[in-house]
């Protein structure tokens, strides 16, 4: 009998919380450049993610891409 694998769906809220927690680990006092959007402090990035605006959605996309690359071993020479 084949085992049934249950895949839990991750909600948008859980993804936002994950990204916010990752952003909290960034060094204070540093700015992060988001292309033509400008330079942002850690606190500004967190506010954008929480408000789900264009910059916040871009940050989420960047973080998810980074995490997916780690999972696939792209960033760790695997």
Image: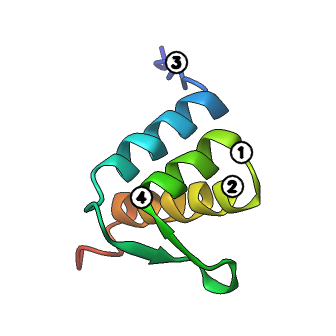
Q: Is residue 16 left or right of residue 52?
A: left
Residue 42, numbered label: 4
Q: Which residue is more in the foreground, 17 or 65?
A: 17
> Which disc, if any, is residue 4?
3
Report which residue position mark 2 lands on.
Answer: 57
**Contact, mark 4 vs mark 1 (Cβ under 8 Å):** no
Instruction: Estimate the x, y position of residue 36 in percent, counting from the top left.
Output: 69, 85
Viewer can see residue 36: yes
**Residue 76 image-quadrant placement:** bottom left
Between disc 4 and disc 1, whose residue precedes? 4
Can you give x and y, in whole percent of width and height, for residue 5 in the image? 50, 23
Element class at badge 4: helix
Tell which residue pokes out farthest to the bottom in this image: 36
The correct choice, above or below, for 43 with respect to 1 in the image is: below
Q: Earlier in the sequence, mark 3 or mark 1?
A: 3
In this picture, residue 65 sits left or right of residue 26: right
| Residue at x 48%, y 14% (from the top left corner) | 1
From the viewer's perspective, is the residue at label 4 or at label 3 nearer?
4
Judge by depth and name the residue closer to the eye, 17 or 11: 17
The residue at the far right in this view is 54
Q: Which mark is residue 52?
A: 1
Secondary structure at badge 2 equals: helix
- The picture places residue 29, in percent across and down from the top left corner, at 30, 67
């Amino acid at each position: 009998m084949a085992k049934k694998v249950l895949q839990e769906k991750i909600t948008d809220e859980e993804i936002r919380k994950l990204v916010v927690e990752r952003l909290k680990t960034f060094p204070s006092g540093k700015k992060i450049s988001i292309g033509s959007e400008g330079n942002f402090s850690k606190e500004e990035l967190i506010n954008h993610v929480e408000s789900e605006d264009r910059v916040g959605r871009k940050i989420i996309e960047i973080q998810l891409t980074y995490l997916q690359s780690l999972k696939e071993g792209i960033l760790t020479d695997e």
